[in-house]
Image (tube, rainbow, N blue to C red):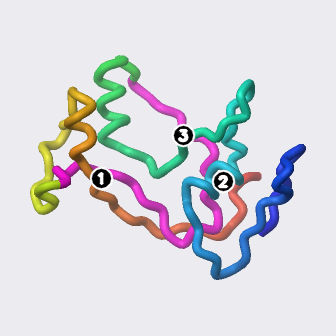
Amino acid sequence: VTLERKDDPRGPYKLATGDAVKVGEMLQEVGHEYGTTTGRRRRCGWLDIPLVKYSSMVNGFTSVSITKLDVLTGLKEIRIAVAYRNVEMTEVRLPSGYFPSHLEDLKKVVCEYETMEGWSEDISK
């Protein structure tokens, strides 16, 4: 796969079949996830359901739109964070709906992921 990076001195983004992929970097490149003003890379990663639930509770929204799913085309697996675990006790799942209230506590959690099968069909049209 070769993707053009307009006006980028690094040239096109190339990915050969069988290459190891850093998913965050791939999502940035394929999804053009760069700041409009600064040009800085945006942080990209898997969908974090506990974070979405917490954000909904705090902000009161009742629906969410998920865009750019076509960026995931070609990945063999899609991961979705469904719960948090304490990094020191990974066998203990934190309560449903739990979201750390302090930054230091947030540093002590790891995501528990469910893995779903990816797709190869072009869904952008």
Residue 69, given in percent of the width and then of the height, sits at 60, 50
| Residue found 72% across the figure and 62% down from its top | 122
* Above/below status of 75 relative to 35: below
User: Which amino acid type is marked by label 2?
Assistant: Asp
Residue 123 spot, x, y in % from top left:
69, 57
Q: How crowded is mark 3: few (under 14 residues within 10 Å), some or many (20 or more)?
A: few
Point 39% across, 24% down: residue? 62
Mark 2 or mark 1, which has the lower sequence index? Answer: 2
Give the label on residue 66, or none.
Answer: 3
User: Which residues fall within the magenta stretch?
Assistant: 62-87
Foreground pick, 5 / 31: 5
Q: Determine which residue is flagged by label 1.
A: 111
Picture quarter containing residue 1? bottom right
Alpha carbon distance from label 2 to label 1:
24 Å
Q: Name the residue under label 2.
A: 70
Q: Is residue 84 magenta?
A: yes
